[in-house]
Amino acid sequence: MVVEIALAVAVLIIGIVLMAYSSEKAVGHSIRIATALRVSPLVIGLILVSIGTDLPEIVNSITSSAIGHGDINVGDSLGSALTQMTLILGLIPFLAGDLRVKKREVLVIGACEVLALILTVSMAEKGYFTRINALFLMAIWIVLILLAKSVMEKDDEEKKWLMPSANGRLRQNLLDWIIAILGFVGVAIGSYAVVQSVIMLSASFNIAEYIVSFFIVAIGTSLPELVVTISALRRKEYALSIGNVIGSCLFDASFSVGIGLFFFPQAISGELATYTGLYAIFGSIFAIFVLALNGKVDKKSGALFILVYLLSYSLMTA
């Protein structure tokens, strides 16, 4: 028993580290590819970076659903949404300084994220995801992104930083593609290791897979968001930073849940998903309200976000 637990913990740590490192590399070089192709800043911030940093959740969704463990998928996705909107945002000012935000951006993307969470929780309450439900969640992400794009305004300064030089280097572009692809492969391998370790730990401690995924795996799969956001913040790219965090939560709450269950519809722990999902909605609304009110994430608001996250552990005894 002790050996099995130690092995499961070791595999979990290795898988999380591999996912975080691989995802950071894949995202970094994907951004370089996007700028070379003159992709718009909105696509880079809300779509490319969000999808890239959510690679662990995407692969977890497909892998866990494929082997009949849909609770790992839903628990990780909803847990990641809560973790990123509270714990990750809360840690940022302590690790990289204040994060300044625009009220318009926060309210628009935040409203979309909360709406996606509400839709997912309402479906999860039934305890079973059909292929139609899953397809709807994937489609709603596209709709909400297009809605956000139509409302949000982009400033010239952001575009200036993201536009590439006139003379791009073919060799460098090829290297970016190779490293990005290898990063995606690393994420897939790390994700498979995490899923297997969760199953082992759940069986060893007789704890529901959903709970392990919501509270433990979600932290690991949220590490790419923390790494990429800190990197962007140090370059004073505030819009890209907040777009990555909230955009990733929007993706987690919709597409990430849906993609695995679209291919492999199945039953989930509806009651667990409901009350943890409701807390994720509360955490998101609280964070959006504070961000819109203060216009920044400083150490004071960061501490509040971390406290909101820590209070979620009381749900384990509910």
Image: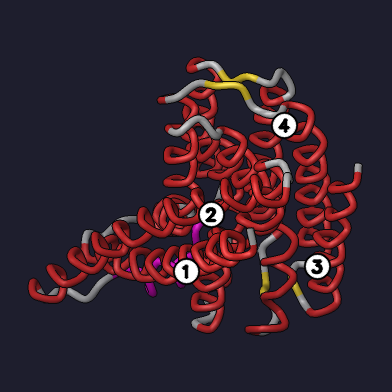
Residue drawn at (32%, 57%) of the image = 184
**Start-end of magenta stretch:** 153-163
Circle 2 residue: 197
| Alpha carbons under labels 1 and 3: distance apart | 25 Å
The answer to which image quadrant residue 226 occupies is: bottom right
170 on left or right of 145: left
> What amino acid is found at the position of numbered circle 1 in the picture?
Ile
Q: Position of residue 252 (x, y in %)?
A: 57, 44
Circle 4 residue: 118
| Alpha carbons under labels 1 and 2: distance apart | 10 Å
> What amino acid is found at the position of numbered circle 3 in the picture?
Ile
Circle 1 residue: 14
Residue 209 lies within the magenta run? no
First in sequence: mark 2 vs mark 4? 4
| Alpha carbons under labels 4 and 3: distance apart | 22 Å
Q: Say above or below: 140 vs 248.
A: above
| Alpha carbons under labels 3 and 2: distance apart | 26 Å
First in sequence: mark 1 vs mark 3? 1
The answer to whether marks 1 and 3 mark residues whose Cβ atoms lie closer than 8 Å is no
Within 10 Å of disc 2 (Cα), the crowding (few <14, some 14-19, many 20+) is: many
Residue drawn at (62%, 36%) of the image = 71
Give the position of the N terminus as an image quadrant.
bottom right
Circle 3 residue: 306
The answer to whether marks 4 and 1 mark residues whose Cβ atoms lie closer than 8 Å is no
First in sequence: mark 4 vs mark 1? 1
Q: Position of residue 33 (x, y in %)?
A: 25, 64
